[in-house]
């Protein structure tokens, strides 16, 4: 019996293909789960490892994350989030929740800027566009967005950490997100 996703290389990582895999996982298809893991785990591991700054812990959280996907895929609602947005936001939330107790709630911890270097992700073109988008931001905008995404800090916590007024941090966040949205909008409008 041949499945449409017998070969990982046959799975094109698009929102439609990921949505199809999530639906099949929700129906109990373990091959779909393996295919989703094979096609997205490097990207997800990169995000988790960047947040946790501990490769071993990141790998444990990664396995836990895909177990969670197997259980929660039936509740995925494509009207609320696109499939890759759902995967990335869920992976980020699980990584933040798994931070060791001494890192949780850190308000003055050193934040390492720059990118967590991993092998090419599942979508090198999008990765290149994302890096280019982040590099095109003003340094203050990039600092705020990296702190918010990778450390899970609120604007008030970021303001306290970097010593800038809350209004300035919110402005940097809004401008940075607007610029990134502007760069990525053509991709979302064409469904790539």
Image (cartoon, grey):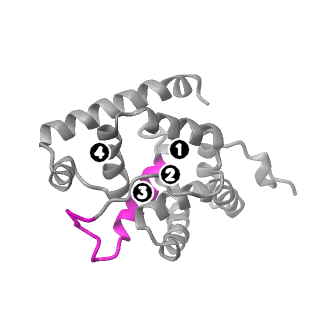
Q: Is residue 63 above or below residue 31?
A: below
Name the secondary structure under disc 3: helix
Q: Earlier in the sequence, mark 1 or mark 3?
A: 1
Name the outermost residue toward the right.
1
10 Å crowding of disc 2: few (<14), some (14-19), many (20+): many
Check the image and report above or below for 9 versus 61: above
Magenta range: 86-109
- In the rendered image, residue 78 lying in the magenta stretch gets the answer no
Q: Position of residue 87 (x, y in %)?
A: 50, 51
Q: Is residue 103 visible?
A: yes
Q: Position of residue 151 (x, y in %)?
A: 33, 58
Residue to which mark 4 is pinned: 144
Q: Residues within 10 Å of mark 1 (few under 14, many from 20)?
A: many
Whether residue 76 can be seen here:
no
Which of the two discs, 1 and 3, sits closer to the camera? 3
The dot on residue 87 is: 2
Kindly check if marks 1 and 2 are in contact, taking CB atoms under 8 A apart as contact. yes
**Residue to which mark 3 is pinned:** 92
- Is there a contact, CB below 8 Å, between mark 1 and mark 3? no
**Residue 186: percent from left, percent from top:** 53, 22
Residue 93 percent coordinates (x, y): 38, 59
Q: Is 149 displayed left or right of 163 in the figure? A: right
Q: First in sequence: mark 2 or mark 4?
A: 2
* Distance between mark 4 and mark 3 Cα atoms: 17 Å
For disc 1, the marked residue is: 83
Secondary structure of the residue carrying numbered label 4 = helix
For the point 46% across and 58% down, the residue is 91
User: Which image quadrant: the C terminus?
Assistant: top right
CA distance separating discs 3 and 2: 9 Å
């Amino acid at each position: 019996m041949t499945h449409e996703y017998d070969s990982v290389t046959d799975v094109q990582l698009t929102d439609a293909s990921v949505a199809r895999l999530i639906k099949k996982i929700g129906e109990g298809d373990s091959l779909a789960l393996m295919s989703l893991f094979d096609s997205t785990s490097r990207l997800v591991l990169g995000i988790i490892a960047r947040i946790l700054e501990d490769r071993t812990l990141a790998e444990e959280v990664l396995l836990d994350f895909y177990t969670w996907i197997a259980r929660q895929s039936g509740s995925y609602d494509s009207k609320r989030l696109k499939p890759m947005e759902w995967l990335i936001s869920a992976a980020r939330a699980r990584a933040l929740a798994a931070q060791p107790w001494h890192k949780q709630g850190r308000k003055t911890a050193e934040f390492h800027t720059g990118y967590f270097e991993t092998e090419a992700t599942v979508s090198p073109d999008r990765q290149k566009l994302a890096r280019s988008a982040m590099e095109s931001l003003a340094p203050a905008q990039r600092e705020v967005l990296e702190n918010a995404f990778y450390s899970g800090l609120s604007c008030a916590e970021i303001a306290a950490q970097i010593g800038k007024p809350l209004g300035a941090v919110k402005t940097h966040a809004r401008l940075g997100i607007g610029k990134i949205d502007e760069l990525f909008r053509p991709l979302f409008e064409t469904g790539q």
